[in-house]
Image (cartoon, coloured by chain):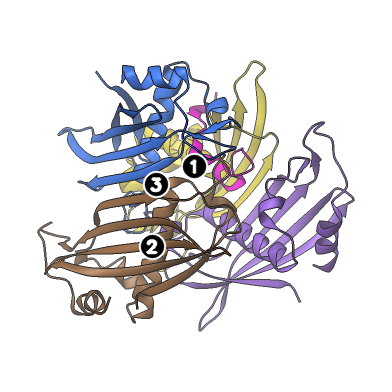
Chain colours: A blue, B yellow, C brown, D purple
Amino acid sequence: MPFTYQRTVHFADTDAAGVVFFANYLAICHEAYEESLSAAGIDLKAFFSDNAIVIPIAKSEADYRRPLACGDKLVVSVSPKSLSQDSYEIRYEITRLGPPEKSAARIRTEHVCIDSGTRSRKALPGPLAAWVQAG
Amino acid sequence: MPFTYQRTVHFADTDAAGVVFFANYLAICHEAYEESLSAAGIDLKAFFSDNAIVIPIAKSEADYRRPLACGDKLVVSVSPKSLSQDSYEIRYEITRLGPPEKSAARIRTEHVCIDSGTRSRKALPGPLAAWVQAG
Amino acid sequence: MPFTYQRTVHFADTDAAGVVFFANYLAICHEAYEESLSAAGIDLKAFFSDNAIVIPIAKSEADYRRPLACGDKLVVSVSPKSLSQDSYEIRYEITRLGPPEKSAARIRTEHVCIDSGTRSRKALPGPLAAWVQAG
Amino acid sequence: MPFTYQRTVHFADTDAAGVVFFANYLAICHEAYEESLSAAGIDLKAFFSDNAIVIPIAKSEADYRRPLACGDKLVVSVSPKSLSQDSYEIRYEITRLGPPEKSAARIRTEHVCIDSGTRSRKALPGPLAAWVQAG
């Protein structure tokens, strides 16, 4: 069972076409990622400001299937998977609750762990590797 | 008792100083406003896309008291008050949960109801006037 | 020669990792798209609020190659290509000016023209088809 | 003569009401502030990530006078003024170019210089003090 995150579409997410701006689908998925890490006991403040390692997103892919409007209720599922000792992918599905319930987007991100000093790849820290394995 | 909205600080809210970007405090308050309207039974989709009237924000004031970091848990209180037949203010307080609990910002917005066609002021629609009165 | 758009990285583009938030690379490309349409004589206000047709983004792919910091000077190239009578792709390259000059990201979006009423696909309007052909 | 910054309204600045989201007026002013600092020879990367001092915004006030739509051409004037040895205000005017040219917003921010370690107030660094004086 993947982790799921509930989210209401906010007015600030939308653009002049009346629906969520395409880049904001990715930002919503990142929120779900943060909540999933937090639920696994990983401290977000330390995670996103650790000076020794950084874990940037190397790739993203998005398949936008439905427009989303202000007030829409969403569920975002978060499915991480290991790619190597120092990288992982996350697959997200954004579902708009109904009735009827509809898949609104499928998104995939790729994350690589890097030593901040040398900029070379580095194995994932233990708690993060455990989060990926459990995903 | 004012309406309150719970919110976690997301990574996308922050900037390179490591804390929430000042303009995003206002966006967080707007989310609280939307949730308060929604809790009062006002349909957000219709509210923010009604073709007959618009209710733009005419003024905002913010007193930023504390930096907020990714993962911080917030409570935002929403206190609307009538200013005239066609306008109202909302006072927000953003509190960072603790321990210790700390006031992080006080924000005020002024809203004016306008006829979309003529751009002249217009009395608030009934459900919105009721929401303001109950605030 | 593709259209190019010059852009400085703003503080609001960044996140607590000190660099541009991954979703904002897509927003920067969309700005370049708007500027390219505008340079071709297409009126943005009409384009993004036309009630008869909408041209949502159906897919996006991004390959993030380098972090970008506040103040970095960027050039974004915009290369549209027809996919069918009712769809096109755009390939973007974000280059960070130097010295040394470095490729910072490659991004691709897919756009589909849709009739707002029926939600069925519709041939691109003439000026937009001409913009795609010239790209 | 205040420093001025030219800016086109982007699609990402807008919301489902079809115009610039109120919080984004502040973000646009911050861009103008960055460009003004940069034009005065202040390095933005160092300025916004200096570990010894931080200069957060303590207050903001905005008077929104006109809606702004995607594609609108803006000029933002930036007028800093010293408040004390360790603080300054900036007054911004956002003008929508025409014809006819119209004032779209007046915004004011208050900035306080703080020692990152002790969190106590600290005199502005020389180049910044010079920028404020010249404003």
Quadrant assignment for the N terminus of chain D: bottom right
* Residue B129 point in image, percent of width and height: 45, 42
Using residue D18 as the reference point, say whether residue C68 is left or right of it: right
Same chain for marks 2 and 1? Answer: no
- Residue C107 part of the magenta-drawn span: no
Give the SS element for disc 1: helix
In front: label 2 or label 1: 2
Using residue C84 as the reference point, say whether residue B97 is left or right of it: right
| Residue designated by label 1 | B30
* Residue D114 point in image, percent of width and height: 80, 40
Disc 1 to disc 3, C-alpha distance: 11 Å
Disc 3 to disc 2, C-alpha distance: 25 Å
Residue type at mark 3 is: Asp
Q: Which residues are magenta?
A: B1-24
| Residue designated by label 3 | A13
Residue type at mark 1 is: His
- Residue B135 disc label: none
Same chain for marks 3 and 2? Answer: no
Using residue C9 as the reference point, say whether residue C80 is left or right of it: left
In front: label 3 or label 2: 2
Report the residue at 41% width, 69% height from top. Answer: B118
Judging from the image, mark 2 belongs to the subunit labelled C
Give the SS element for disc 3: helix
| Residue designated by label 2 | C93
- Residue B18 part of the magenta-drawn span: yes
Give the SS element for disc 2: strand
Q: How many marks?
A: 3
